Image (tube, rainbow, N blue to C red):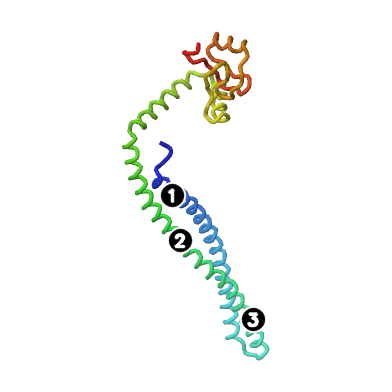
Amino acid sequence: LTAFPPDMATMDAELKTIAKRQESVAKNLADAKTKAETLDGQVKLAQRLEGHAKAALKQSTHKVQYTAAIRELDERERQTASVARPLKELTARIALLEKEAEELEARQTQLQAQFDELHQIFLSEHENQVAAQGIHKTRCAELEAKLEPAALSRFNKLIAQRQGRAVVPVDNGNCGGCRTKLRAPLLSQLRAQGTIPCEFCQRILFIPPKQD
């Protein structure tokens, strides 16, 4: 039940892509807004200084003062423009990111609804498998509870290392996992104990009833 039909698999892949893009957009948006707050503060400061320069120009009574005030105002206006320009560009970028975030959310909502509907149909068509899967999980949990923690840890490592085949039968005196010929003393020990690890691949060996 982990392998979806092609149409559901396509939706699932798109949902994961959307989620990844949403994470990226959210980070970029947060960074942009933080930077915009800093630039906004710089613009306001530059505008205040520009206002002071304009006031000083109006109060100038001598030619020398007036000339100096004009230069000061020009400099303040350039400073205001130099910080206002990137703020304007950043504001436009924030608007684009917010629009993209809204579009992604709308697409995700639409796609998730379609996927959930198909998933319910998929599960209903495989109801027996769902029930069997539940029984299997319950039985596994019961058996795991009977194992010592160290034994369970070794078993889980075998599952991971041996592509899910931790327990294998003996076939014609060979390990059913690595196909290595087992020594006679090892086979005798296996018959006496029921299960033992393979000397070579460490998988848990057992002898099928028909071979015992």
Specify the amino acid type for callout 2. Glu
Task: Tell me the residue at 56%/62% (across/down).
Answer: 35
Mark 3 and mark 1 lie on one chain; the one further toward the N terminus is: 1
Percent x, y of residue 108 = 40, 52
Specify the amino acid type for callout 3. Glu
Q: Nearer the viewer, residue 148 or 196?
A: 196
* Element carrying mark 1: helix
Task: Tell me the residue at 41%/55% (across/down).
Answer: 105
Q: Are marks 2 and 1 in contact (CB under 8 Å)?
A: no
Q: Which residue is mark 1?
A: 15
Direction right: furthest residue: 64
Mark 2 and mark 3 lie on one chain; the one further toward the N terminus is: 3
Badge 3 crowding class, 10 Å Cα cut-off, few under 14, some 14 to 19, many 20 or more, is: some
Mark 2 and mark 1 lie on one chain; the one further toward the N terminus is: 1
Badge 1 crowding class, 10 Å Cα cut-off, few under 14, some 14 to 19, many 20 or more, is: some
102 w.r.t. 200: above or below = below
From mark 2 to mark 1, how far is it between C-alphas? Answer: 19 Å
Q: Which residue is mark 3?
A: 72
Q: Nearer the viewer, mark 2 or mark 1?
A: 1
Percent x, y of residue 78 = 61, 78
Q: Nearer the viewer, residue 35 or 51?
A: 35
Percent x, y of residue 142 = 44, 21
